[in-house]
Amino acid sequence: MKKSVTVVILVVIALTFGGSMYYLYKKNAEDPVVYQTEKPSRQNIIKKTVATGSILPLEEVLIKPNISGVIEEIYVEGGDFVKSGDLIAKLKVVPNLSALNDAKNAIEDAKITLDDQRRNFSRQQTLFEKGVISQADLDRAQVSYDQAKQAYSAANKRYDIVRTGTTSGLSSAANTLIRATVSGMVLEVPVEVGNQVIEANTFNEGTTIAAIADIDKMIFEGKVDESEVGKIHEDLPLEITVGAIEDRVFPAVLDYIAPKGNEENGAIQFEIKGTLTKRDSTFIRAGLSANASIILDRADSVIAVKEALVQFDPETKQPYVEVETGQQQFERRDLELGISDGIWVEVRSGLEEDASIKVWNAISPSESGA
């Protein structure tokens, strides 16, 4: 019995010793860890946030009629340039029957008054010739007669305006002729010949016949999330990229941030506007979707390292890197960091430009292929 126990103990010791030797052999057979290094570089670092929106004219004027009617002719189309006073369209008036009847009755009333004043003036003239009345009495009769003629003429013109939108002597100022009120490009003409249009009044904003804007004065109008609005302020520079225009960036300046946000899809969004500065001959169409990079801060030609190379002390949270001092020998260097764009971070102090920084978190070939 004792002999069997001794044999078992000896076998266990032998197996343990053999396993230890095998482990040490495999450990020594592994390749030593070789750390790669990278050097800092000079970078232009831009810290920014992005807002989505569209390009719109700074001022867009809607041309509306002063009288209801039917479009008889259209003289412009989208893309045309017009000057203030240029003819845009012509209306054919569809008269209001009530107003037309009132105007016709006014002519009849004026005609009755005119006939009465004509007879009265004729009588007064006869009496004056006989020496019965004075010159003053005749002059008063003359004035009343002239006023009656004027009222009759005005009633006829009123009738013509109600029926046709114009009258003799006023054709150039006719309500049926729709003219541009500003100079610029015609953005759209949302009506066609034969469409009925309504004048602007207290109860109706009226039918838009054309939209005109100065395309040399464009703005970006977009929205930013509430998490970003606290980081921005007026006068920040913007870089506008338009989806339909590749490889072009248009400079702008942020000049409006809405004081109140609106909820959209469960998030609070704030409206912003930025005026595009003078640009080249590139034509930007109104309504194009665009993105605005709002530049929060920037540092030009500064020493920078990749953020992935920076480590943080677990206790003090102090940023540092490990700098090579010899063959695969490294020492810690505490850093003072500046702005970051998410890839590169500015190094304000603690690192020389020619230092070799340890890549402490490189992915091994086996990990990358997993």
Image (spheres, grey):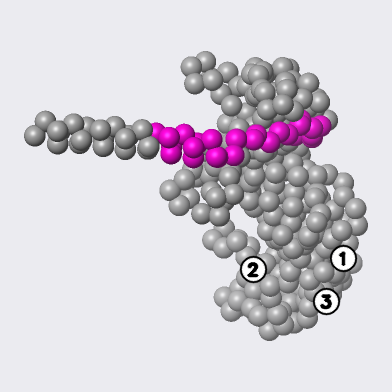
Question: Which three-letter amino acid code belongs to the residue tagged 3?
Answer: Tyr
Q: Residue furthest bottom?
A: 194
Q: Which residues are magenta?
A: 20-45
Going from the N terminus, do you reach mark 1 or mark 3 first?
A: 3
Identify the residue position indicated by label 1 in the image: 81
Up the image or down, 109 lies above or below 272; here it is: below
Residue 255 point in image, percent of width and height = 71, 37
| Residue sitting at x 75%, y 49% | 240
Q: How packed is label 2: few (under 14 Cα within 10 Å), some, or many (20 or more)? A: some
Front position in the image: 356 or 192: 356
Residue under the image location 73 percent in, 22 percent down: 326
Q: Position of residue 98 (x, y in %)?
A: 57, 75
Where does label 2 land, which residue?
207
- In primary-sequence order, the first of circles 1 and 2 is 1
Give the residue displayed 87% in from the left and 65% down from the top. Answer: 81
Amino acid tagged 2: Thr
142 left or right of 38 in image: right
Rendered image quadrant of residue 169: bottom right
What is the spatial separation of the Cα atoms under label 2 and label 3, in whole angstroms? 17 Å
Q: Amino acid at mark 1?
A: Phe
Marks 1,2: beta carbons within 8 A: no
Give the residue displayed 66% in from the left and 80% down from the top.
195
157 vs 132: above or below = below
Asked whether residue 276 is drawn in magenta, I would say no
Asked whether the viewer can see residue 338, the reply is no
